[in-house]
């Protein structure tokens, strides 16, 4: 193990063995004051390696993270089709890591140097009210909604979500087939095909939902890689305890900061942070440079409130826990304000207010049936009685496993109601533009 010291930051290489395989993680460490005499030693990986895959060091770090996760899953006897899909998706991440269109799904673009200086005092009155409401209501759904609002999450129409998920499953499934058939050589062939198709899909014009699909595909690849990243800390933290004497408060902080929340399941199947990891999101820089926010963290991680909230499952009644959640949401607001300022400085058309930029979603003024309407228009569906144009009114709920579902239309000329069957595979082909 090699270790170097530069000012207050140390660098060390941590070896981790799994099933006879050796993985090396180059960590950085520095002290972090959490107020009231509470100090933790914060360890992290150089996340810049995972944003641009140009140098050998980036690919080496990526292989260690992904290889460690795959070996861990196999050692636990948990390797199944879901893990194969996850593995193939994570392997695709270097193909999309630099795609600017990822920001259309969820904002996590890194800022220029020295852009993380604003403190909580610089928030607008409206932002303060929103944060106070999150803390007061103690509602996980409200936390998710606020982060969605601040970080501009793209919400696909509910009617299209099963088809987007099915299109993702089928595309990645081709990679699973290649993996099973030819191992890494098969994956290389699959990556080349994905790279070519993404380049085609990103071209302007044509079906906008093809670009939405590509963006969501890229984001799912990122989240899959983030899962592997979080898993690495399951081994790194015990190593730091054994070999570097990591104290309890530092351990609590690291487990929280490098953690990826479990999926909420259900229809949306995502967590409040949309698959992100705090340590990998640039809002972390605002949090760690604000003494007031760090002090809030100290009152949680440095006291018995941590165990009551997380170990004993009493987060709902923990003021310290919800104060910490409020501090994280505050850092998200600070990040988004700085991101908007940076974009305006580049002469782009970034909105001045978050409200003006918030995406429309189903139930809030968005068009839930918009993609289906576009599909029917592209297929030239007309009234079977008078051959006039028809308007989509509604459609039955459907899963992507169904062969067909009915769309209900009204003729613009004779005003008759028309029931039009839609083939699931036809809609999927249109979505993928194959």
Image (cartoon, rainbow, N blue to C red):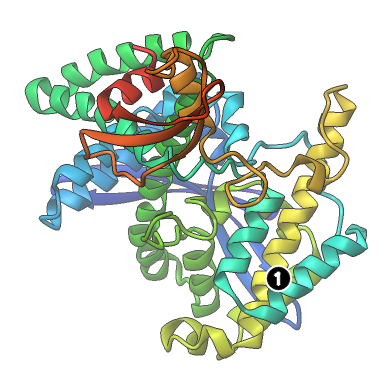
Above or below 421: residue 195: above
Above or below 316: residue 336: above
Q: Secondary structure at mark 1?
A: helix
Q: Nearer the viewer, residue 92 or 14?
A: 92
Residue in the image at 67% along x and 46% along y: 365
How would you rate the neighbour count of disc 1 (Cα within 10 Å): few for under 14, some for 14-19, many for 20 or more?
A: many
Q: Where's residue 183, x and y in %? A: 13, 24
| Residue underneath mark 1 | 326
Residue in the image at 46% along x and 30% along y: 416
- Total marks placed: 1
Q: Where's residue 372, x and y in %? A: 46, 30
Kindly tell me whether residue 298 is visible in this rendering: no
Q: Is residue 216 left or right of residue 295?
A: left
Q: Is residue 158 left or right of residue 424?
A: right
Residue in the image at 87% along x and 53% along y: 118
Q: Where's residue 265, x and y in %? A: 36, 60
Q: Nearer the viewer, residue 164 or 184?
A: 164
Above or below 182: residue 132: below
Q: Based on the displayed image, in which of its 4 quarters is residue 382 positioned?
A: top left
Above or below 398: residue 310: below
Kindly tell me whether residue 314 is visible in this rendering: yes
Q: Quadrant of the C terminus?
A: top left
Residue in the image at 75% along x and 77% along y: 35
Q: Where's residue 137, x and y in %? A: 67, 79
Q: Is residue 392 left or right of residue 343?
A: left
Q: Nearer the viewer, residue 113 or 17?
A: 113
């Amino acid at each position: 193990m090699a270790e170097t010291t530069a000012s207050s930051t140390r660098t060390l290489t941590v070896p981790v063995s799994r099933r006879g395989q050796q993985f090396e993680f180059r960590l950085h460490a520095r002290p972090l004051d959490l107020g009231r005499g509470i100090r933790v030693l914060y360890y992290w990986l150089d996340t810049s390696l995972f944003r641009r895959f140009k140098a050998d060091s980036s690919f080496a770090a990526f292989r260690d993270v992904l290889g460690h996760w795959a070996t861990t899953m196999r050692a636990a006897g948990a390797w199944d089709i879901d893990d194969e899909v996850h593995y193939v998706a994570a392997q695709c991440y270097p193909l999309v890591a630099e795609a600017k269109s990822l920001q259309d799904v969820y904002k996590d673009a890194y800022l220029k140097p020295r852009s993380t200086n604003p403190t909580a005092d610089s928030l607008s009155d409206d932002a303060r009210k929103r944060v106070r409401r999150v803390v007061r209501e103690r509602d996980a759904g409200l936390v998710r909604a606020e982060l969605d609002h601040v970080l501009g999450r793209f919400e696909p129409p509910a009617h299209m979500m099963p088809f987007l998920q099915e299109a993702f499953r089928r595309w990645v499934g081709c990679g699973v087939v290649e993996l099973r058939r030819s191992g890494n050589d098969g994956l290389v062939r699959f990556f080349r095909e994905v790279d070519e198709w993404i380049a085609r899909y990103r071209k302007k014009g044509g079906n906008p939902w093809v670009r939405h699909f590509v963006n969501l595909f890229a984001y799912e690849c990122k989240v899959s890689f983030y899962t592997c990243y979080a898993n690495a800390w399951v081994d790194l933290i015990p190593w730091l305890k054994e070999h570097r004497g990591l104290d309890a408060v530092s351990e609590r902080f690291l487990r929280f900061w490098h953690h990826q929340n479990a999926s909420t399941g259900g229809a949306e199947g995502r967590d409040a942070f949309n698959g992100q990891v705090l340590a990998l999101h640039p809002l972390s820089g605002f949090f760690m440079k604000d003494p007031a926010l760090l002090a809030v963290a100290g009152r949680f991680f440095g006291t018995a409130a941590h165990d009551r909230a997380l170990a004993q499952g009493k987060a709902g009644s923990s003021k310290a826990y919800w104060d910490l959640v409020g501090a994280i949401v505050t850092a998200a607001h600070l990040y988004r304000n700085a991101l908007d300022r940076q974009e305006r400085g580049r002469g782009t058309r970034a909105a001045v207010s978050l409200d003006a930029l918030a995406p429309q979603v189903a139930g809030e003024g968005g068009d839930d049936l918009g993609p289906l309407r576009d599909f029917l228009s592209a297929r030239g569906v007309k009234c079977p009685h008078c051959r006039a144009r028809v308007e989509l009114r509604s459609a039955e709920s459907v899963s992507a496993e169904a062969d067909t579902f009915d769309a209900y239309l009204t003729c613009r000329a004779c005003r008759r109601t028309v029931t039009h069957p839609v083939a699931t595979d036809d809609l999927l082909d249109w979505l993928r533009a194959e």
